[in-house]
């Protein structure tokens, strides 16, 4: 009996999310928009946000827990007492700025190419992404908040290999952070760095990998 993997093409691809399927960083946009909305010092918002965001990334905190701490530390709760968690969640999800050329590329990838995702992500956001129609194309996406660890931890790449169901050596991993590319390569993946300002060059490099 032959396995499904034996009928797949030789090479596949897995992506990061933030900075690849988004323009700029989600954290940067969300903290800037929160500060603007509530008239807060953006540096103070970011200090609190980045001090605690790892709790979201590894699934230790829920998003409401994170907001409660952030609101207290930054003065958001006092700046506008009517601005509650539901408002924060809407602002947070609304801070996603899609990188449309990458979504177009995703739609064009041959159906027999297995497409994965490994993202340092957050509760609620990961649930939101699972509902994005274009991401139905993804094969067993892996989110840090669901596995309890984040890139560049080697175990996160082991989780990606398991989720992909094919050997790491047959998968290109795409990320906008060099540290994560290096970690992926140590785990046996083929690393492809991504810069949205050089998207056409990236498409050529990915096509060359998939055709190799």
Image: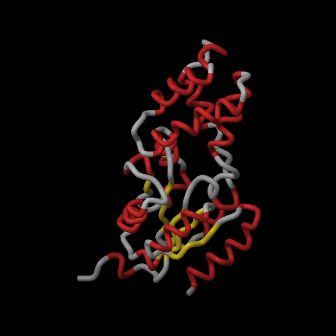
Query: Residue at position x 47%, y 64% from top?
Result: 116
From the top left corner, tell me how far across and down residue 59 is, in percent.
Answer: 41, 42
Front-lying residue, 1 or 188? 188
Front-lying residue, 117 or 46? 46
Front-lying residue, 190 or 205? 190
Give the tally of numbered discs.
0
- Compared across the picture, whether 42 is left or right of 152 comes to right
58 shown above or below 76 = below
Query: Residue at position x 37%, y 51% from top?
Result: 147
7 shown above or below 18 = below
Q: Quadrant of the N terminus?
A: bottom left
From the top left corner, tell me how far across and down residue 40 is, in percent.
Answer: 71, 24
From the top left corner, tell me how far across and down residue 48 is, in percent.
Answer: 58, 32
- Compared across the picture, whether 128 is left or right of 42 comes to left
- Compared across the picture, whether 113 is left or right of 178 comes to left
Where residue 169 sits, quadrant-wise, is: bottom left
Q: Quadrant of the C terminus?
A: bottom right
Residue 112 shows in the view: no
Query: Residue at position x 39%, y 47% from top?
Result: 146
From the top left corner, tell me how far across and down residue 96 is, in percent.
Answer: 64, 43
Residue 94 shows in the view: yes
Query: Residue at position x 52%, y 76% from top?
Result: 190
């Amino acid at each position: 009996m032959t396995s499904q993997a034996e009928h797949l093409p030789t090479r596949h691809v897995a992506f990061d999310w933030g900075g690849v399927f988004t323009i700029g960083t989600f954290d940067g946009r969300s903290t800037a928009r929160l500060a603007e909305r509530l008239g807060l010092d953006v540096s103070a918002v970011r200090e609190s946000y980045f001090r605690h965001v790892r709790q979201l990334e590894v699934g230790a905190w829920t998003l409401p827990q994170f907001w409660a701490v952030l609101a207290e530390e930054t003065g958001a709760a006092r700046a506008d007492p009517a601005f509650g968690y539901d408002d924060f969640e809407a602002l947070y999800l609304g801070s996603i700025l899609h990188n449309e050329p990458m979504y177009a590329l995703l739609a064009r990838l041959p159906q027999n190419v297995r497409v994965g995702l490994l993202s340092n992500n957050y509760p609620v956001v990961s649930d939101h992404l699972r509902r994005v129609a274009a991401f139905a194309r993804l094969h067993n996406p892996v989110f840090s908040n669901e596995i309890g660890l984040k890139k560049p931890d080697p175990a996160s790449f082991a989780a990606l290999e398991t989720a992909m169901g094919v050997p790491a050596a047959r998968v290109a991993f795409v990320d906008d952070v060099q540290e994560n590319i290096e970690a992926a390569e140590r785990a046996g993946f083929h690393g492809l760095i991504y810069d949205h300002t050089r998207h056409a060059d990236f498409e050529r490099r990915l096509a060359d990998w998939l055709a190799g």
